[in-house]
Amino acid sequence: MTSRETARTPEDLTRLFVARANDRDAAGMAALYAPDAVLAFPPGHTTVGRNAIRAVLAEFAEHAPLPLREEEPLATVHYGDLALCSTRSQDGTGVRVQVTKRQPDGSWLRIIDRPEAGPGQGQG
């Protein structure tokens, strides 16, 4: 696997994100998001656009307890070139959810990401 491998399926995005996070590669993590993507992180905030997401992920990578472990995916729901992906978090924060979109070259990118959708969290 190279650090710039593209996601060939929506489910690949989680695997690639975890690998890049474990390498503390914020630019590589951000490359998994569409240029105008929306990230509901840090908790209580919304981060819009790949450049802003890269800055948030750089802070995350600097402080994240590593290694991160890949979480078991729940069934992906497809609608044309969109897919809803989710995993049940191992840390007990709830379910992590992402909307992904197939790109013209067949790869997939995250367009909406809520990494911490735990009980009692408000809408972002």
Image (cartoon, rainbow, N blue to C red):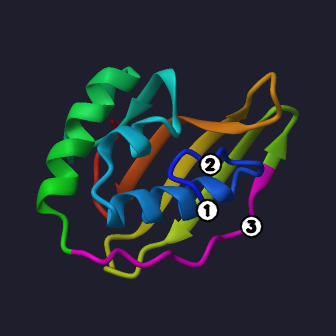
Q: Quadrant of residue 87?
A: bottom right
Q: Nearer the viewer, mark 2 or mark 3?
A: 2
Kindly state the secondary structure of the residue where label 1 is placed: loop
Of the residues under marks 3 and 1, which one precedes in the sequence? 1
The quadrant in which the N terminus is found is: bottom right
Q: Nearer the viewer, mark 3 or mark 1?
A: 1
Q: Most prominent secondary structure in the magenta stretch?
A: loop
Tell me the residue that label 3 is attached to.
75
Q: Residues within 10 Å of mark 2 (few under 14, many from 20)?
A: some
Q: Residue at x 57, y 55 (%)?
A: 2
Tell me the residue that label 1 is attached to.
1
In the rendered image, residue 55, in percent from the top left (x then y), is placed at 21, 33
Residue range in magenta is 66-77
Q: Residue at x 20, y 52 (%)?
A: 60
In the rendered image, residue 54, in percent from the top left (x then y), is placed at 30, 33
Q: Residue at x 42, y 43 (%)?
A: 28
Q: Is residue 115 visible?
A: yes
Of the residues under marks 2 and 3, which one precedes in the sequence? 2
Tell me the residue that label 2 is attached to.
5
How far apart in space, not on screen, are marks 3 and 1 (Cα)? 24 Å
In the rendered image, residue 43, in percent from the top left (x then y), is placed at 21, 47
Q: Residue type at mark 1: give it.
A: Met
Judged left or right of residue 31, residue 74 is right
* Residue 20 included in the magenta stretch of the image: no
How far apart in space, not on screen, are marks 2 and 1 (Cα)? 7 Å
In the rendered view, would you say 8 is above or below 55?
Answer: below
Q: Residues within 10 Å of mark 3 (few under 14, many from 20)?
A: few
Q: Is residue 118 visible?
A: no
